[in-house]
């Protein structure tokens, strides 16, 4: 999908929609990440692909490099939440939860997170986003950072060009919802669809680029399959050793209040996310947290969204913070400056996490409505 030209169409569409807002190119970064999440399902892939285009564009428009890196790190947090998500698939396999239900559960939280970021950018971009010199020379300070109208893509042509890419998540979710195919079969159909779009519609996919994409995908799939196979052994070992039961008893001695339990789970996941990569943390903690949380009445799908959001926010938290590290490297700024700049986005991420945790219907509304 990336090699077939979908990314550029998504960027143009996002710019045509929000480029006219304050901090237009930063707003475009956020909306592009939402669109890109429906293609890649990986935050790191989003930072790598979009960051190489959007960070230089922000710097060219006089954004502070550290602010550009913070926006580019924070925006792709939405990608593991927006279906189809690699992290949700891993959680579904490890916990036995319906992957289709998880996909639908991620849609509303993903849109909510994007709206929160766009509001945050609106209020911070003028004060934190630009150099003093850039603000001083701006003719209209209220509209600073807006993509000039003459440079902004037209909405309808951009929508038309992006339509084949936008239809892909609809195809996947619609097919799962109406029982046309399973999530596994949806993956195969998505590949065929991407080949048709890349070769016949956008005509940017060549045999050489296809070979490169296959090689890159093979490496990723091989890594994921090794991780999942190890996860099954790990889950069996924990279950055989009665570790989940002992963990549940230990937690029950602290509290039997579901609200306090969810706060504890969030605290543990946020700390773990600071040091361990998301999929590894997912595999280690899910077999322990799942039986404890479900025994207290937490819905398995809601728990999955809580875990995925926690570990996604971990992309911003040092010392690991893979998303922040990559975006800082692309922006050519030190990690110290990047950490300072990302602080407001991290606070917004934690506020979003608490909202998702204690208002479960944000996650469960669509699965309950569409899947029953």
Image (cartoon, helix red, strand yellow):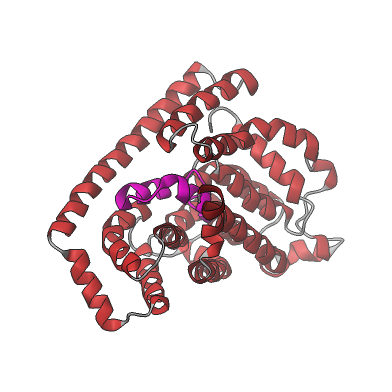
- Residue 310: image location, x then y, percent: 43, 63
Chief secondary structure of the magenta span?
A: helix
Q: Nearer the viewer, residue 245 or 308?
A: 245
- Residue 149: image location, x then y, percent: 84, 46
**Does residue 276 appear in the picture of this structure?**
yes
**Horizontal side of residue 96 vs 336, given as left or right:** left
Compared with residue 338, is residue 199 higher up or lower down, i.e. above or below? above
- Residue 27: image location, x then y, percent: 68, 54
Name which quarter of the figure residue 64 lies in.
Answer: bottom right
Looking at the image, the residue that sits furthest to the right is 139
**Horizontal side of residue 296 vs 246, given as left or right:** right
**Horizontal side of residue 301 vs 152, given as left or right:** left
Q: Nearer the viewer, residue 173 or 153?
A: 173
* Residue at 60% over, 30% down: 5
**Does residue 43 appear in the picture of this structure?**
no
* Residue at 26% over, 41% down: 226
**Horizontal side of residue 183 vs 226, given as left or right:** right
Over which residues does the magenta segment extend? 77-105
* Residue at 79% over, 52% down: 20
Compared with residue 34, is residue 70 higher up or lower down, i.e. above or below? below
User: How many numbered marks, from 0 up?
Assistant: 0
Looking at the image, the residue that sits furthest to the front is 372
Looking at the image, the residue that sits furthest to the bottom is 254
Any magenta on residue 323? no
* Residue at 22% over, 65% down: 244
- Residue 309: image location, x then y, percent: 46, 60
Any magenta on residue 81? yes
């Amino acid at each position: 999908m990336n090699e077939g030209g979908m990314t550029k169409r998504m960027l143009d569409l996002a710019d045509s929609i929000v480029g006219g807002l304050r901090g237009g190119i930063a707003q475009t970064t956020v909306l592009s990440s939402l669109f890109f999440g429906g293609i890649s399902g990986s935050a790191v892939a989003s930072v790598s692909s979009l960051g190489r285009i959007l960070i230089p564009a922000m710097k060219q428009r006089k954004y502070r490099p550290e602010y550009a890196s913070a926006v580019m790190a924070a925006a792709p947090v939405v990608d593991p939440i927006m279906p189809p998500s690699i992290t949700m698939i891993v959680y579904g396999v490890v916990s036995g939860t319906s992957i289709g239900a998880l996909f639908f559960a991620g849609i509303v939280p993903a849109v909510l997170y994007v709206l929160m970021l766009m509001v945050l950018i609106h209020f911070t971009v003028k004060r934190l986003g630009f150099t003093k010199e850039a603000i001083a020379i701006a003719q209209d300070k209220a509209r600073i950072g807006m993509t000039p109208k003459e440079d902004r893509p037209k909405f309808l042509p951009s929508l038309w060009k992006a339509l084949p890419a936008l239809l892909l998540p609809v195809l996947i979710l619609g097919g799962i919802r109406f029982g046309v195919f399973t999530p596994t079969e949806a993956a195969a159909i998505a590949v065929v669809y991407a080949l048709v779009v890349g070769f016949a519609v956008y005509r940017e996919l060549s045999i050489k680029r296809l070979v490169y994409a296959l090689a890159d995908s093979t490496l990723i799939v091989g890594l994921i399959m090794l991780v999942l196979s190890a996860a099954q052994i790990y889950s069996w070992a924990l279950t055989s050793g009665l570790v989940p039961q002992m963990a549940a008893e230990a937690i029950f001695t602290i509290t039997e209040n579901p609200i306090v339990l969810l706060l504890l789970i969030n605290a543990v996941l946020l700390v773990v996310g600071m040091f361990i990569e998301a999929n590894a943390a997912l595999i280690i903690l899910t077999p322990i947290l799942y039986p404890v949380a479900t025994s207290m009445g937490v819905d398995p799908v809601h728990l999955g969204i809580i875990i995925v959001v926690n570990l996604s926010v971990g992309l911003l938290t040092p010392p690991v913070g893979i998303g922040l590290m990559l975006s800082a490297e692309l922006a050519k700024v030190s990690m110290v400056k990047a950490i300072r700049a990302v602080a407001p986005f991290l606070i917004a991420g934690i506020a979003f996490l608490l909202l998702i945790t204690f208002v479960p219907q944000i996650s469960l509304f669509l699965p309950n409505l569409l899947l029953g």
